[in-house]
Image (tube, rainbow, N blue to C red):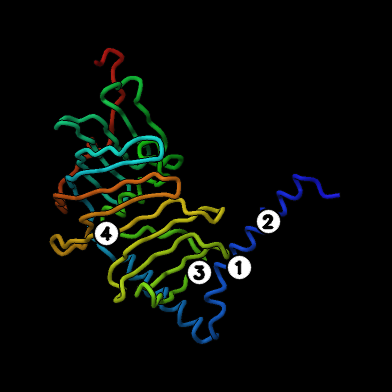
Amino acid sequence: MITASCRHLLCAAGACLLLVLSACSAVNRLPPEERSTARLEAQAVLEQLALTNASLSSFKGLGRIKLWDADRPPLSERVAWIVSAPEKLGLVVLAAGRPVVKVAADGQFIYMIDLRDPVGSYAKVRTSDASLERLIRIPITVTDIIAILAGRTPIRDHSRAFLQYDRQTEQWLLVIENWWHVVEKIYLSADRKDVRRMEVFGADGKVRYRVEFEEMQNVLGYRVPRRLGLSDDAGNGVQLDIEQYLTDVPVTSSMFVLPPPHSGSP
C-alpha cells in the first residue's frame, strides 16, 4: 500500500522528471546537424559574454534605487557604490543626503549595518555562505551583483548549452543546463550583441531571480547598464537608475570593510 508520504515523493520525482524532459526537448527535437550547430553557436555566445568588459576592473556609480516586496510599500532612495571586480563592493544607501545603510564585501566577508541602529544591526558573514537576501530579499550573491553592475552576465556552472531563436519576440535564447537541469536562461537581442534579460533557476526548476537590462549606455568604451531591474517570483524587486558611472577608479582595501561599531555608538 502506498502511503501519503510515498505519493508525495512520487509526485515530486515526477515533477522533476517533467522539468528535465521539457528543458531538453526543444534542442533534442532538432535534427542532429542542427542540434550540433545550436550547441556550437551557444559556445560562441558564451565566449563572447566572457569577454564583455573583461578589462573593467574598478568602477563607481551614483543613482536611485527602488525596492519593493509583498509585505511593504515601495522604498526609493539614493545609492552610491564602488567596486573592485570581481568580488569587492562598497555600497551606501542615502536618505535626505545622509548614509543610512552600508554594505561592504572584501572577498572573504560581507558586512552590513543600518546606521540608525548600528550595534543591533551590524552583521559580518562569510561570502561563501551569504547573499544579499537580507538586504533586498532576493538570493543573489555579491559577485553576481558586481558582474551585473559591470555590464557582464554571470554564467552558472554547466555541462552544456544551446541557442535558439524566438521569432515571436525576435530574441535569441541561450539555455544553459547542468546535467539536464536548466540552471539559467539568457535572452539576447536579435543581433546577439546585448543581453536583454537573464533568469537563474534553482534545483527545483523555479526562478531564483531574474535581471532585466532595461537600458544600456557606453562609458569610455564599456557597455554598461543605465537602468536595470532585479526580481523574483515572490513579489520582491529592485530597480536601479544609474545617473553617474565612472570607470577605472582608484580603490583601497579599506573601502570594502565595515568595522564593528562601538557599543556606545549613537
Which label's residue is closer to the chain start, 4 or 3? Answer: 3
Which label's residue is closer to the chain start, 2 or 4? Answer: 2
Pointers 3 and 1 in contact (C-beta within 8 Å) = no
On residue 160, which mark appears? 3
Residue at x 28% of width, y 68% of height: 194
Residue at x 31% of width, y 41% of height: 67
- Mark 4: amino acid: Glu
Mark 3–mark 1 Cα distance, whole angstroms, equals: 15 Å
On residue 214, which mark appears? 4
Mark 2–mark 3 Cα distance, whole angstroms, equals: 23 Å
Mark 1–mark 2 Cα distance, whole angstroms, equals: 12 Å
Pointers 2 and 4 in contact (C-beta within 8 Å) = no
- Pick out the residue farthest to the top: 264
Mark 2–mark 4 Cα distance, whole angstroms, equals: 37 Å
Q: State the residue in front, 50 or 96.
A: 96
Pointers 1 and 2 in contact (C-beta within 8 Å) = no
Element type where label 3 sits in the image: strand
Element type where label 2 sits in the image: helix
Pointers 4 and 3 in contact (C-beta within 8 Å) = no
Q: 183 above or below 61?
A: below
Residue 190 image-quadrant placement = bottom left
Residue 213 image-quadrant placement = bottom left
- Mark 3: amino acid: Arg
Residue at x 47% of width, y 54% of height: 207
- Mark 2: amino acid: Ala
Residue at x 32% of width, y 47% of height: 87
Which label's residue is closer to the chain start, 2 or 3? Answer: 2
Q: Quadrant of the C terminus?
A: top left
Mark 4–mark 3 Cα distance, whole angstroms, equals: 28 Å
Q: Nearer the viewer, mark 3 or mark 1?
A: 1
Residue under numbered circle 1:
21
Q: State the residue in front, 84 or 20.
A: 20
